[in-house]
């Protein structure tokens, strides 16, 4: 089995976990940089998937399963956005080219994202795998995933003997996740778009590892693990709920101001507060996971709310911890008469 | 429906001029249910019994809305209502606590049932009960469970008719059903409006969302006339416009959900649209920009709707589960059903208009 993107925390965890499965003889972990974490007993091959060397690695090792986890939004270390884009798109092309030449490859698993749907006010409330996006992502990571998925579809047509599984993950959160949304929630004060309360869905790291495992093995009886699947925890959280549960106050800004501030931050190179990130935090995105349950046969351990609770535990309290607020309300309740004059609109937003 | 001339408007107006005389006002109160439209004193009593009756569902919210009826209440009925007030206060505080800590649930569409029931409905209810004095007929035509599609006429420049329909179903239906409205995409583009719409349980008017809601067994409300209906000039009031492309029929057919035609009378006159500033509308990105006798001449004051008397009638359900599965693809059947629904709404509108004694009473 060959795993790309092993230098990332999530890739490393997957490599360590997959070796314990009896069906797996040998795991080859590939990345362009040396991973900081240990990889269990896996063989690490330092290769850049943007180069043709990946074809040689694949041919020499004779891997039968390829797990492509190197489609990511953020650079590892100090890479620029251009490098990330190149790894996402050119890397995927090279890897698929190598797979096409290799006679031994029987299974390909690609870690994609629900970003491919974009988010727009004219979209249906819930996306299924077949929903065509009303407004295609215009750039950034979302466009990378759309293009990478296009190449994967082309590969699936050319090599019908290879089982191809594309997993579209909702925002991945967990104690060690390094997604853009996780770094957004790490801000002391959360800037939000005034007048919008987006619906968000999360997938827990543990569930991500588990579903990647299911997809990279032979399917169980009555299930099918080739095709495209949305992966997300049950339920929905609003951004306002997230900020309250996290205990971080929000600062509503007007949409143009947010866009402007986002581009300013990007030019300064502080964080990747990309336009599609702003769109997600404006309109939100919810996907349908019926296919994941019924066809893939995967039941996530964590719901969206539980995933977020786990994330909150790992982050520590913010400026306005929910416990303190609850305590304050309880103290008001304990007072003999007071509290009657609470304006009802206070809680309406 | 070209023969829309039967509307007895002149009749209406002549009776409308009788507004000032007090004995004219007495009349309707006697004929209707006492909870509907009797002088202020009685309304307040009804309200008090209601708020104390179901403290659990409306803790403190209604009470906080209008200070008038609540403050004298404990003085009048000492022990029991004092207890009720305390309980209401405790309910309100636990509600506040849940809201502040984010400990509440929303569904996939962003529908916040708690907020809708306890805050947003209490804000809409005075408009529904006191301002438009909505009369609801045929609420028994809405099934107690299972998916159903309510199809209504659309009017009034601003979509207040949808909101009033939602309050009507929420307050009047014995099975406590919630109406999930399908709204135009403009609603979801505008800030604040989109947030409130999602929390009220509205979603985008598209086949995917409607089918998903019906499959979940929800009550879905749709106004197929869309902007053509809501933005039509005053001279065309109560003339139904084209019903879109009849997409709502194929959605209902695919889910086997009954179609309930609904006629709303009174919403047409809240903002008599005598003109349409098309250039301004195009500049702002709106489908129309209404000019009424008061708006925009009087500024924000002109945006206050006229206090018309409303009637909402839910008609006999039209079953759709008797058709074969391929019926949803049959355009002929679709057009026939669309026409049937449209005619039923139009006829009910005429009937209600003939019965109506005045626009305002």
Image: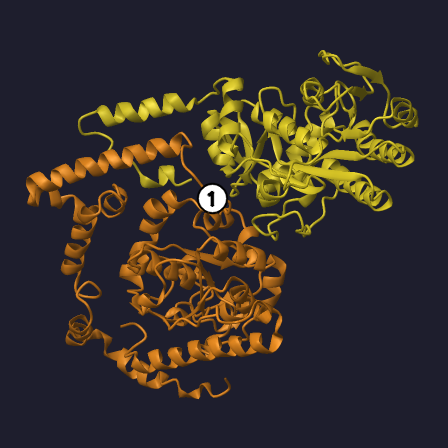
Chain colours: A yellow, B orange
Q: Which residue is mark 1?
A: B107
Q: Quadrant of the C terminus of chain B?
A: bottom left
Quadrant position of residue B186:
bottom right
Direction from residue A245 to residue A157 in the image, left or right: right
Residue B148 relative to residue A344: left or right: right
Does A37 sit left or right of B79 as displayed? Answer: right
Visible in this render: residue B245?
no
Does dot 1 land on a helix, a strand or a loop? Answer: loop
A335 lies above or below B148: above
Nearer to me, B304 or A339? A339
Q: Tell me what residue is drawn at x 77 percent, y 39 percent.
A: A163
Residue A99 x, y percent position in the rendering: 86, 33
Above or below, B236 relative to B110? below
Closest to the observer, B43 or B165: B165
Vertical side of B345 occupied by A338: above or below: above
User: What residue is rendered at 37% in x and 37% in y?
Assistant: A347
Q: Alpha-carbon neighbours of circle 1 within 10 Å: few (<14), some, or many (≥20)?
A: some
Query: In this orientation, which residue lies closer to the viewer: B146 or A8?
Result: B146
Query: Which percent across, then down, holds residue A301?
Result: 53, 30
Residue A321 sits above or below residue B187 on the image: above
| Whole-percent x, y for residue A258 in the image | 61, 36
Q: Could you tell me how many numbered marks the image carries?
A: 1
Residue A118: % across, % down: 67, 44
Q: Is residue A264 visible?
A: yes
Snapshot quadrant of residue B287:
bottom right
Q: Chain of mark 1?
A: B
Q: Residue furthest front?
A: A221
């Amino acid at each position: 089995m060959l795993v790309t993107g092993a230098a990332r925390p999530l890739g490393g965890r997957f490599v360590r976990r997959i070796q314990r499965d009896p069906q797996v003889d040998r795991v080859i972990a590939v990345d362009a940089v040396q991973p900081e974490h240990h990889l269990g007993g896996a063989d690490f091959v330092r290769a850049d998937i943007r180069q043709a060397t990946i074809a040689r690695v694949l041919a020499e090792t004779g891997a039968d399963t390829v797990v492509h986890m190197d489609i990511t939004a953020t650079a590892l270390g100090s890479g620029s956005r251009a490098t990330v884009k190149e790894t996402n798109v050119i890397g995927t092309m090279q890897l698929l080219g190598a797979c096409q030449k290799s006679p031994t490859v029987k299974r390909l698993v690609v870690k994609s994202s629900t970003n491919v749907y974009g988010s727009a006010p004219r979209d249906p409330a819930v996306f299924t795998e077949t929903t065509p996006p009303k407004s295609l992502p215009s750039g950034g990571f979302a466009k990378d995933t759309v293009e990478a998925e296009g190449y994967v579809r082309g590969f699936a047509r050319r090599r019908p003997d290879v089982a191809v599984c594309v997993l579209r993950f909702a925002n991945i959160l967990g104690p060690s996740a390094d997604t853009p949304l996780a770094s957004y929630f790490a801000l002391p004060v959360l800037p939000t778009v005034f007048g919008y309360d987006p619906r968000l869905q999360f997938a827990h790291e543990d569930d991500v590892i588990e579903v990647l495992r299911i997809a990279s093995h032979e399917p169980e009886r009555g299930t099918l693990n080739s095709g495209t699947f949305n992966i997300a925890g049950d339920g929905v959280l609003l951004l306002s709920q997230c900020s309250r549960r996290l205990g971080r106050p929000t600062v509503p800004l007007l949409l143009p101001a947010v866009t402007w501030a986002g581009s300013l931050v990007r030019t300064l190179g502080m964080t990747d507060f990309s336009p599609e990130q702003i769109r997600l935090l404006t309109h939100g995105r919810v996907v349908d996971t019926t296919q994941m349950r019924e066809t893939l046969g995967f039941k996530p351990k964590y719901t969206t709310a539980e995933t977020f609770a786990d994330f909150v535990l790992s982050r520590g309290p913010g400026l306005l911890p929910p416990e303190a607020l609850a305590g304050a309300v309880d103290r008001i309740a304990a007072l003999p008469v007071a509290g009657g004059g609470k304006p009802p609109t206070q809680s309406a937003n | 429906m070209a023969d829309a001339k039967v509307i007895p408007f002149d009749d209406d107006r002549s009776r409308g001029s009788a507004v000032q005389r007090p004995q004219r006002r007495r009349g309707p109160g006697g004929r209707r249910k006492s909870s509907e439209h009797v002088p202020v004193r009685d309304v307040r009593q009804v309200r008090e019994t209601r708020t104390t009756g179901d403290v659990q569902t409306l803790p403190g919210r209604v009470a906080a809305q209008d200070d008038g009826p609540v403050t004298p209440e404990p003085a009048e009925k000492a022990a029991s209502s004092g207890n009720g007030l305390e309980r209401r206060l405790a309910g309100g505080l636990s509600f506040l606590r849940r809201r502040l800590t984010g400990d509440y649930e929303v569904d996939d569409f962003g529908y916040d049932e708690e907020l809708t029931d306890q805050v947003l409905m209490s804000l809409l209810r005075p408009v529904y009960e006191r301002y438009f004095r909505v009369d609801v007929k045929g609420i028994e035509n809405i099934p107690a469970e299972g998916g159903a599609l309510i199809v209504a006429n659309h009017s009034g420049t601003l979509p207040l008719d949808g909101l009033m329909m939602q309050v009507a179903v929420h307050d009047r239906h014995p099975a406590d059903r919630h109406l999930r409205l399908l709204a135009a995409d403009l609603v979801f583009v505008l800030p604040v409006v989109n947030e409130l719409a999602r929390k009220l349980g509205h979603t985008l008017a598209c086949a995917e969302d409607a089918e998903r809601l019906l499959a979940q067994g929800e009550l879905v409300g749709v106004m197929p006339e869309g902007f053509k209906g809501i933005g039509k000039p005053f001279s065309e009031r109560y003339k139904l416009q084209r019903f879109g492309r009849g997409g709502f029929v194929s959605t209902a057919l695919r889910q086997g959900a009954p179609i309930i035609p609904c006629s709303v009378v009174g919403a047409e006159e809240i903002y008599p649209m005598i003109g349409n500033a098309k250039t301004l509308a195009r500049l702002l990105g709106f489908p129309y920009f209404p000019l009424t006798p008061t708006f925009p001449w009087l500024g924000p004051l002109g945006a206050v709707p006229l206090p018309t008397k409303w009637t909402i009638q839910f008609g006999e359900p039209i079953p759709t589960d008797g058709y074969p599965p391929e019926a949803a693809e049959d355009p002929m059947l679709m057009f026939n059903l669309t026409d049937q629904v449209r005619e039923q709404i139009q006829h009910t509108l005429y009937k209600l208009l003939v019965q109506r004694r005045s626009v305002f009473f």
